[in-house]
């Protein structure tokens, strides 16, 4: 697992102990959707109650008029202003403008998706592959693949997990008249925006 992925472990446990714990819990997570795991997982705290700019790595705000079709950028949410905290894996999201064949050409927030980068299998960080024949999220650790339109895994170990642990948490966007994209306040729950590292019902 990468350094970024490991950064998501909560304080109080060594990261190695935490990962062992989560590895042991993985099977239980997949078969016990009735347990309120979301209360115990390190969901991002300090989510804003107001919309915030969808800020690109260069510090500018994403604009639906200029963001390339079939392209992705890593964004951070919620931001704290603390450089170390803001590098936590659980604050990393893929902002994707869908390819044209999936409706990405329209100047609309609907052309975009924002999914948690934390793979639902064992928390590596997946990335978006825009090349023809792929156009999906892929995790480098064990090959889980995610549908760019829905965030649901369709191949690899994450696809074998029971809902909600087969679908990535999401953030919702809106646009202002000038095309700038904003992140709407999320509701962290499996029936809403999802629980980072655990999943979302669809
Ligand atoms: Fe992503 Fe295993 S951690 S496929």
Image: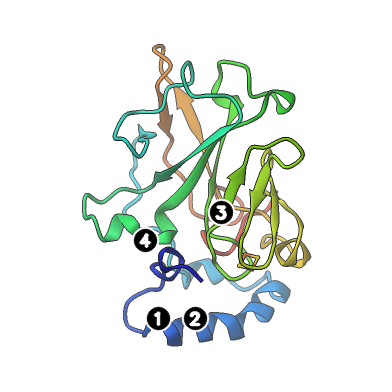
**Sooner in the amino-acid sequence: mark 4 or mark 1:** 1
Q: Earlier in the sequence, mark 3 or mark 4?
A: 4
Question: Distance between the Cα atoms at labels 2 and 4?
Answer: 15 Å
**Mark 3 or 4: the one toward you:** 4
Q: Earlier in the sequence, mark 1 or mark 3?
A: 1
Mark 1 against mark 3, which lies toward the viewer? 1
- Horizontal and vertical percent position of residue 133: 77, 39
Disc 1 CB within 8 Å of nearest ligand 1 atom: no
Q: Could you say which disc has been placed on residue 88 in the image? A: 4
Question: Do the numbered discs 2 and 4 sit on residues whose CB atoms are within 8 Å?
Answer: no
- Element marked by disc 3: loop
Q: Pinpoint residue 39: horizontal percent, then vertical percent.
A: 48, 69
Question: Which quadrant of the figure has residue 197?
Answer: bottom right
Mark 4 Cα shell of 10 Å, populated few (<14), some (14-19), many (≥20)? many
In the picture provided, is 116 more to the left or to the right than 90? Answer: right
Residue at mark 2:
19
Using the numbered discs, state the Cα–Cα distance from disc 1 to disc 2 in whole angstroms: 6 Å
Q: Which color scheme does this rendered protein use?
A: rainbow
Relative to 10, 34 lies left or right: right
Position in image of residue 189 (x %, y %): 54, 56
Q: Earlier in the sequence, mark 3 or mark 2?
A: 2
Residue that protrudes farthest toward the front in the picture: 131
SS type, badge 2: helix
Q: Is residue 129 above or below residue 26?
A: above
Residue wearing tag 1 = 15
Which residue does the image show at 49% across and 81% down from the upper left? 19
Q: Residues within 10 Å of mark 2 (few under 14, many from 20)?
A: some
**Mark 1 and mark 2 residues within 8 Å of each other at the beta carbon:** yes
> In the drawing, does residue 166 fall left or right of residue 20?
right
């Amino acid at each position: 697992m990468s350094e970024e992925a490991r950064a998501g472990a909560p304080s109080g446990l060594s990261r190695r102990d935490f990962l062992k714990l989560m590895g042991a819990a993985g099977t239980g997570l997949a078969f016990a959707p009735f347990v309120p795991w979301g209360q115990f997982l390190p969901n991002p705290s300090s989510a804003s109650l107001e919309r915030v700019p969808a800020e690109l790595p260069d510090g500018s705000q994403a604009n639906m008029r200029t963001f390339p079709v079939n392209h992705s950028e890593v964004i951070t949410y919620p931001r704290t202003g603390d450089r170390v905290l803001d590098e936590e894996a659980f604050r990393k999201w893929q902002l994707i403008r869908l390819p044209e064949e999936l409706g990405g050409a329209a100047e609309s927030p609907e052309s975009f998706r924002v999914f948690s980068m934390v793979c639902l299998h064992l928390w590596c960080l997946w990335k978006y592959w825009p090349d023809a024949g792929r156009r999906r999220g892929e995790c480098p650790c064990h090959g889980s693949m995610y549908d760019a339109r829905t965030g649901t895994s369709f191949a690899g170990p994450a696809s074998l997990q029971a809902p909600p642990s087969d679908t990535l948490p999401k953030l919702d966007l809106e646009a202002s008249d000038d095309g700038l994209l904003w992140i709407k306040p999320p509701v962290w729950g499996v029936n809403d925006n999802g629980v980072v590292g655990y999943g979302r019902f669809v």
